[in-house]
Image: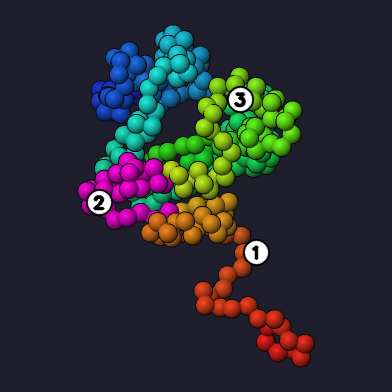
Amino acid sequence: MIPQEIAEVRPRLADFAFEMLGGLPRKDQRAAGELYVRGLLADGQRKSMQPMAARLGADHQRLQQFITSSTWDYAAVRRNVARWFAAAQPADALVAGDTGFPKDGDASPCVARQYSGTLGKTGNCQVGVSVHLVNERASCAADWRLFCPQSWDDKALDDPVAAARVRRRREQARIPGDIRHREKWRLALEMIDEMAGPDGWGLLEQVTAAGGTRPVVTADAGYGDNTAFRLELENRGWQYVVAVKGTTSARPGDARPATRSLGGGPG
């Protein structure tokens, strides 16, 4: 958006930011949050602090401090955004997936050589697992997790020297001790539970209150090919539409394996 367009919607944007960030304890945090949202909407490909601040005519250290050092409950903001979307839009599906963020160095948290859908190949990147609320007209990035590869989890390494090296790397990147390697499908399931589980954000109640029906879960073959993921969705009462590889085999639930006879009988 160009500055004129942002100026035209500024009152609506301010109301939205207040609703989403209203739980932040300090007024300066809420103001910095609204400034950051404007920076994300402004024209320009680079969305790091200095380019955004230059476009906004603001001090980049103010934005940097808000994102990296200011204490606020980001999970509560995500919850507010998800509930706002579900109340205003039909939430037809929860889409589980992941996105790669290419990186040049190795200091960023959880960066490693791994497959990136963004790159379409294996490369040096971070990977974020997400669950989006979607319908035919709109999409909302409702919840996110940064994927932690095994190479960033010292407890997953048998070599004590390598584990000590990873611990130092985690400390430098300020990774909390409870962040450990978990498969992407498990992260997606955790987020679905957080959003719509019994003690979660109350998303299903929000959808129902808006006149909608229970959404379905969708995912690509990276998740759909995992039998455990599909079974866990079934156990939670979710209907799902997931992609599977062409080599995936299927059989009726009551089918039983039989050994092919030497005489050419049925196998």
Whole-percent x, y for residue 121 in the image: 67, 42
Region in magenta: 192-217
- Amino acid type indicated by mark 2: Thr
Checking the image for residue 170, the label placed there is 3
Q: Distance between the residues labelled 2 and 1?
A: 38 Å
Whole-percent x, y for residue 27 in the image: 29, 14
Q: In which quarter of the image is residue 143?
A: top left
Whole-percent x, y for residue 20 in the image: 30, 29
Q: Name the residue under label 1.
A: 247
Q: Name the residue under label 2.
A: 208
Which structural element holds mark 2? helix
From the viewer's perspective, is 90 left or right of 107? left
From the viewer's perspective, is 28 left or right of 114? left
- Amino acid type indicated by mark 1: Thr
Does residue 52 appear in the picture of this structure? no
Does residue 64 appear in the picture of this structure? yes
- Amino acid type indicated by mark 3: Arg
Of mark 2 and mark 1, the one earlier in the sequence is 2
Whole-percent x, y for residue 73 in the image: 37, 26
Checking the image for residue 216, the label placed there is none
212 drawn magenta = yes
Query: Do residues under tags 3 and 2 come within 8 Å of each other at their CB atoms?
Result: no
Q: Is residue 108 above or below residue 263?
A: above
Q: How far apart are marks 3 and 2 (CA)?
A: 42 Å
